Structure formats: C-alpha cells, structure tokens
Image: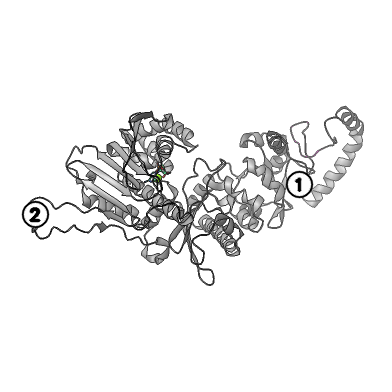
Amino acid sequence: MSTETFEFQVEARQLLQMMIHSIYSNKDVFLRELVSNASDALDKLRVEALRDDSLGADVSDLHIEIETDKDARTLTVRDNGVGMSRDEVVELIGTIANSGTAKFLQQLKEADSTAAAEGLIGQFGVGFYSSFMVADEVTLLTRRAGETEGTRWTSTGEGTYTIETVADAPQGTAVTLRLKPVDTEDRLYDYTSPWKIKEIVKRYSDFITWPIRMAAQPAAEGTSESASDDAPREPETLNSMKALWARPREEVTDDEYHELYKHISHDWNDPLETIRLQAEGTFEYQALLFVPAHASQDLFLQGHKRGVQLYVKRVFIMDDCEALMPPYLRFVKGVVDAQDLSLNVSREILQQDRQIQLMHRRLAKKVLSTVKDMMAKNPERYATFWREFGRVLKEGLLSDFENRDAILEVCSFATTHDADKPTTLREYVERMKDGQEHIFYLTGESRQAIENSPHMEAFRAKGIEVLLLTDPVDEVWVDSVPEFDGRQLRSVAKGEVDLGTEDEKKEAETEREKHQQEFAGLLTWMKDQLSENVKDVRLSSRLTVSPACIVSDTHDATPALENIYRAMGQ
Ligand code: ADP
Ligand code: MG
C-alpha cells in the first residue's frame, strides 16, 4: 500500500516544536519514556491474552530490547507487546488526547523563563515525543497483537508524519531514532554507546518487571575474536526487575522510588511524598503510594483516572484501580500488590470484595495520617500539598463520614486572623475568645468579596476570627459538617449571631427589646413592602456600618449555593 502523509494536530505540533528545540535539559529521559511505553504495552498484552485466548498472540517471551548502531547512528527500542493498529497509531501518536493540553500550552507560552518552561514540561510529561529531543527522525514500526498487517510511522517532527502498511511486521512495536549529530565527542550524549544505554536503564528503569535486553553487539573490528567463537552472543539483561515494594525498605533509595513514580504517573517531577505499607496475615499485600507535587491538569475533569495500579503476586493486573482509593484521594499514585487474588479478577469483583474494601479503608487512613505527619513535621511540604490538593481532599468531607474528623484535622483555611497564612481548625479553636462558642466562617467567591460583606462588620468590630471559604466545594461541605472538636461551625451570614459574654448578651437583649418597640411600626411597614421577597425583617446587632443586610435562615442554602444549584439546572 502507498505511503500517506498526515498533519499533526495543532497541540501536538506545538509540543513537538518544543521538543525539537529541546528546552528540557535532561535529555536522557527520552529512553525512560520509550521503555516505559514498551513496558505498558507488555502489561497490556499479558492482560489481554489472559482474558481472551483466541487473541493468537505470542506471549512466551515478553521483553524489551534495545539495539544501537554506531555507524548508522540509530537507536531502537523494541517490544513484543500489544502493538497498535493503524488507526491507533494515528490517534495515539498523531494527536494529544489529554484535555489539559491546551491550558498547558498556554501556560508554556506565558512562561517567562526557560526554567519555568522546563518545570511545566516536567509536570506534564511528554512521553513519546521526547524522542525528538535527541533524534531528527523517528520511525515506529508496529503490529497489533492478533492482527496480520503492521504499520510504519515516520516523522521528523516538523508538522507532518507518514504512514504506510507493512505486510511482515513482527508483533509489538519498534521505535527507531536517527540520532542528531553530536557536535563534540561528548560521551555523555552518545546514545549509540552501549555503556551509556546501560547506565540510563539502570538509573531510570531498573524496576521494570520485564527484561530489558541489550541486543548483542557485533564484535568490534580488529579484536582478537577467534574464528571458532562465532556462536551468537547472549543478549544481556540490563535491569534487575525487582519490584521495589517487595524489597526491604532500607535497601531502596529515594531515587529508585521516584523513578517508579515517574513510570506510573507519567509525571516528570519527583513526588512530594512516598508512602509504604505492608499488611501481613490472612490477606497479605504491599502498597507503595505516592503523593505528587502537582495536581494534574485534569484532576477536576470528568473521567479523571485514579492512579493506583493493582498487581497480584508481582504481576500487573490493572491501571486506575478505583476500588483501591476513594475519589477524594484520586491524586494518589502507586502500586498495590496483593498475594491472594485471582489473576483474572475484574473491576466488578473488586468493588464487591470484602478484603479489598478493608484494604481501601486502610489505604485511605494511611494517606490521611501521612498528610497529618507532613503537617507536623514539614509545614512547607504540607503547604504545597494543600495548595495542590486541598480542594479535592475537602470533597471527602461529603463522602467519607468515617474519616471526616481525620480530614478536618488536615484541612486549612484562609482566615481573618492572618491574611498570609491559612489556619487549621485546631489553631482556630485555640485562638477562640472567651465566651465564643462557635467556629465562624463565611463562604463567597473571593477573599475580597467576603471581607467586604456587611456580615463581617460585627465580627471585625469585636475582633472575632472568621474563616474565609472560597472554594466551590466549601459551599457544600459546610452544610454537612456539624462540628469540629465539639464546636459548631456557623456561617456569619445565617440566622442569629450571638457574640460576646453572658453579660454583654443580656445587655444587648434589653437594648434590643427597647429598639424593637421603638421601630415596631417601621419593621411592620418594611415587611409589608418586601413580603414578596423576604421572610422577615428584623433589627440586627451584626452591623456596625451598613444600614441593612440580607440574611439566610440557619438551614437555608447560601446565595452562592443557590447559584451553584441554579447552574446545575435545579
Ligand atoms: P503516555 O504513555 O503518557 O500515554 P506517550 O506519548 O508516551 O504518552 O504515548 C502515547 C500513547 O501511544 C500511549 O498511551 C500508547 O497508547 C501508545 N504507545 C506508545 N508507545 C507504545 C508501544 N511501544 N506499544 C504500544 N503502544 C504504544
Ligand atoms: Mg508514555
């Protein structure tokens, strides 16, 4: 069949341009990305073959092979995994499906320095395209397991790529890079050197569960290879394939953990926190979880995948195992390896499984207690955590009643106490004034909007601290969380507010009765005039400057919440 030429999708083209002019300083990571993709393809094939024995795929020796050619200046990464159909190649390699991409590219354009741009690339990870940091042409030859014809994809990364159908492609995928010339004799960047390849694989991909082999090198010319020694040399396996979660903790370095994190998450940055957990006994499992340092672009979009992979006895079973993590911890990445599950276990079965439910609870508690420790021991790291994931975590206040107190413990909120530093509820309670019974808050669209609210006047006058809640989710959880540490949470915009000591309150009461009589006529008249719009008109002690304000009943929805409901069409 003839060769067809296609154009890259706009976003893909922009990303490629960036890779070609490589702003990313650590070019070695291209190999990690190719190996990571090959490993994923082997995982997928193994799972597919297990489910469907009519697939007709060869799964007898699944592996990754790396081959270099010094003279041609090429490097090939080959796997005999699941491969791609022609349509998949166009869809997966020619376009970028990630819905956060457009936003990401915009940020990248606005980045004011190379370092900032590099940071953004790191957060996003560009996978396959990173090949173009080191190659001026990339060829991908692939055949989907179970299909007969293969596909060859070729591009220089400059706007277009070509595709042709190939009759005799081996199962799986081979990616061949034509390496850019090295200007200097810089061994550091010579990716045709087996020595260099070994070093990179060892460093970034040692834990990959499939063998990564170095294709046998042809004997160098002029070496004294005897004529009888012409038996093909054994390819060398470069990685130890040891599962990090199964190795003794003190044996594994932080760097090794971080590389596993990058493989699982497709993030190019180190994680914020690494969590290990071992469960012995009747249901044995090991978990290695990571809290990323950045929220991914699609964390709040529908269809966001949870990042915990399930393994059974070291064998990969599934990605995004939603049965293992509650939705409000969907940013957590990692691996759970269970000893006593069937390799055939399905998502449906997992959801029902009692042991899995127990594991889910234990993992959620462990993540929350890790955050609590972080708060105590590493406030800066906690601040990063909260900035990135606080909004997601607060969703748990609505869904996870068992852990509600644990979640409240690790929440922090903007406050009138200190404009620059958020406060925890515990700190708030410690600062409460004599006679103050409740924790006061006000929700709104922004800090400024809240601070300008007339509801705040009396609180400001009395120096009573108010929490300023501006996340949309705040509107919702405040109604379902009755108290923290025995103190009720009260909106300053709802119902009666009673501030001050007992004496002050008594005095205020007498005062109010006096005023009530004085203004009775006016109040009746106003109530009459406004009867269509308000339930009641009453005198208030909450204002010091403004003449009037609108208040909700204690159990009514706040105006902002009404807006949310309206937006949802209710
Ligand atoms: P990511 O791995 O984050 O999805 P990549 O850019 O690395 O992004 O790869 C894009 C997609 O191309 C992968 O999700 C996968 O579907 C497909 N792909 C890449 N390499 C291979 C491979 N060796 N075998 C099969 N599919 C692959
Ligand atoms: Mg990838």
Q: Which amino acid does label 2 sit on?
A: Thr
| Magenta span includes 338 | no
Asked if one can make out residue 418 in the rendered structure from this viewpoint, the answer is yes
User: Crowding at label 2, few (<14), some or many (≥20) Cα neighbours within 10 Å?
Assistant: few
Closer to the camera, 567 or 4?
Answer: 4
Where is residue 240 shown, x and y percent of the image?
A: 32, 61
Q: Is 540 on the left-hand or right-hand side of 194? A: right
Viewer-proximal residue, 364 or 320? Answer: 320
Question: Image quadrant of ligand 2?
Answer: top left
Q: Which dot, 1 or 2, sits closer to the camera?
A: 2
What residue is shown with label 2? Answer: 223
Which comes sooner in the sequence, label 1 or label 2? 2
Callout 1 crowding tier (Cα within 10 Å): few <14, some 14–19, many ≥20? some
Q: Which residue was labeled with disc 1?
A: 499
Out of 427 and 529, give the one closest to the viewer.
Answer: 529
Span colored in magenta: 539-547
| Whole-percent x, y for residue 2 in the image | 33, 31
Distance, label 1 to label 2, CA atoms, is: 92 Å
Q: Is residue 366 above or below residue 165?
A: below
Secondary structure beneath label 1: loop
Quarter of the image where the C terminus is located = top right
Callout 1: CB less than 8 Å from ligand 1: no
Numbered disc 2: secondary structure: loop
Q: Looking at this view, is 540 or 153 the one in front?
A: 153
Where residue 137 appears, x then y in whole percent? 28, 35
